[in-house]
Image: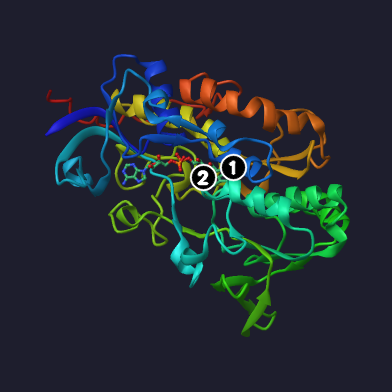
Amino acid sequence: TQRYDVLVVGGGAAGCAVTASLLKRDPHLRIAVVEPREQHYYQPGWTLVGAGIFDRAQTERPMGKCIPQAAQWIRSAVAAFEPDQQRVVLEDGNRLGYRTLVVCPGLSLNWDAVEGLRETLGKNGVTSNYKFELAPYTWQLVQNLRRGRALFTQPPMPIKCAGAPQKAMYLSCDWWQKQGVLSDIDVEFCSSGAVLFGVSTFVPPLMNYIERYGAQLSFNTTLTAVDGPAHKAWFKQVDAQGNSQTVEKSFDFLHVVPHQQAPAFVSQSPLANADGWVEADHETLRHPRYGNIFSLGDVCAAPNAKTAAAVRKQAPVVAENVIAVLAGKGPRALYDGYGSCPLTVERGKVILAEFGYGGKLLPTFPLDPVVPRRLAWDLKVKMMPGIYFDMMLRGREWLAHPKHLPHEPLAVEAPPACDF
Ligand code: FAD
């Protein structure tokens, strides 16, 4: 069995960022990244593709240019974990050994949780910014709609970028308003949740936009089935007493956000918690039962907002702590739960929601975070892709240095050396 100092599962935002961060700290580490895809996606750009602001090509790069050169790229998928043997099993049955393991294969989009959805996606006015191939179709539909009914859905939490379902609505409404057709379009936001946004500070400024666009809010309302050719959708609606009923709605435009869950090979593994996500200490991101396993990104069970912004702060924490464990020390670097959601409320303005565990506000800039700003829009549209590809994926940790335990932790037994 090949054996590595660090084995990274997944070459997405988290896998590439943590690998770069590790190599920056120790260029001699023997690291492999297991990643099956040839393309790497900058998913935060898809909201902008769906609004005609980015071309989808701006959100895609060859994987080989994103995984750091000094790491070995293994073009395969992990199928199972054998943490007691310090091995993973690949889809072809081969095994790879490790001293430390970093688990970050993202989450799974479950398009099949909504009956009839898969058959009609990309047709009949049904779209989703959660898929690279479909975000351009959102923009096409937005431009073509002049009157009728537009529905935007949000599934149960947790989902990646919890603000993205409503961002699609705001940018669509802004376009329709500028074209003078918004008054002829009934807009409805159908959310499985009970509130517009999970951090209450940001609800009043978002409500201003809901009113400005005349959108109707339907909470506790979950999309369950779609008939594309008939332009009908069915929702399960739960009232305050807990009684549920099925509600039928017709539509001319339907933007769907799919149900989301941990990948099956993770949820069925010994690393998972009861909900299927990889268990991790919320601060050190280390697995509570396997001391040489860490997790970050969307698959991690820590209760932060699942965003690339969270990954930017998690990667240096995991990198420092992995290096400590390899040296036989306990982890000292701590993650504060930081995540961020740039809420694109209109073209040219963003409410930059930045917060940590428990909804604690963690603004990067000394400005009132509830005010929609041009500066935050420029950050999202002009600067973020560069910060992502040229800094975060290269281990350049601008404003991302972690806090530390105030004291030296107890020594731990170092994992056995690599036998290569
Ligand atoms: P991913 O980037 O999804 O990468 C996971 C990788 O693991 C993939 O390359 C995949 O191929 C690989 N993989 C999967 N299975 C296996 C396996 N079995 N073995 C090996 N590898 C595997 N975040 C923000 O910060 N700001 C935003 O404005 C924002 N907007 C968003 C808008 C949309 C529409 C979407 C979809 C997401 C948005 N996000 C945003 C969220 C952000 O993209 C994710 O949180 C981030 O990509 C998480 O990184 P990750 O590495 O955990 O997962």
> In percent of the image, x 35 and y 16: which residue is there?
26
Is residue 332 visible in the rendered structure shown here?
no
Residue 123 place in picture, x, y as percent: 55, 61
- What is the secondary structure assignment of the residue under circle 2? loop
- What is the secondary structure assignment of the residue under circle 1? helix
Circles 2 and 1: CB atoms closer than 8 Å: yes
Residue 65 place in picture, x, y as percent: 41, 23
- Considering the image in quadrants, where does the N terminus appear? top left
Callout 1 environment at 10 Å: few (<14), some (14 to 19), or many (20+)? many
Q: Nearer the viewer, residue 388 or 355?
A: 388
Q: Nearer the viewer, residue 104 or 165?
A: 165
> In percent of the image, x 20 and y 40: which residue is there?
86
Residue 50 place in picture, x, y as percent: 64, 46
Residue 100 is left or right of residue 20, and the answer is: left
Q: Nearer the viewer, residue 350 or 121?
A: 121
Badge 2 is on which residue? 132
- Considering the image in quadrants, where does the C terminus appear? top left
Badge 1 is on which residue? 46
Is the residue marked 1 within 8 Å of ligand 1, measured from its CB?
A: yes
**Residue 287 position (above or below residue 248):** above
In which quarter of the view is residue 262 placed? bottom left
**Residue 391 position (above or below residue 336):** above
Is residue 15 visible in the rendered structure shown here?
yes
> In percent of the image, x 29 and y 19: which residue is there?
29
In which quarter of the view is residue 75 placed? top left
Residue 2 is left or right of residue 290, and the answer is: left
Q: Amino acid at mark 1?
A: Trp
Residue 194 place in picture, x, y as percent: 68, 67
Q: Amino acid at mark 2?
A: Phe
> In percent of the image, x 59 and y 64: which residue is there?
124
Callout 2 environment at 10 Å: few (<14), some (14 to 19), or many (20+)? many
Q: Earlier in the sequence, mark 2 or mark 1?
A: 1
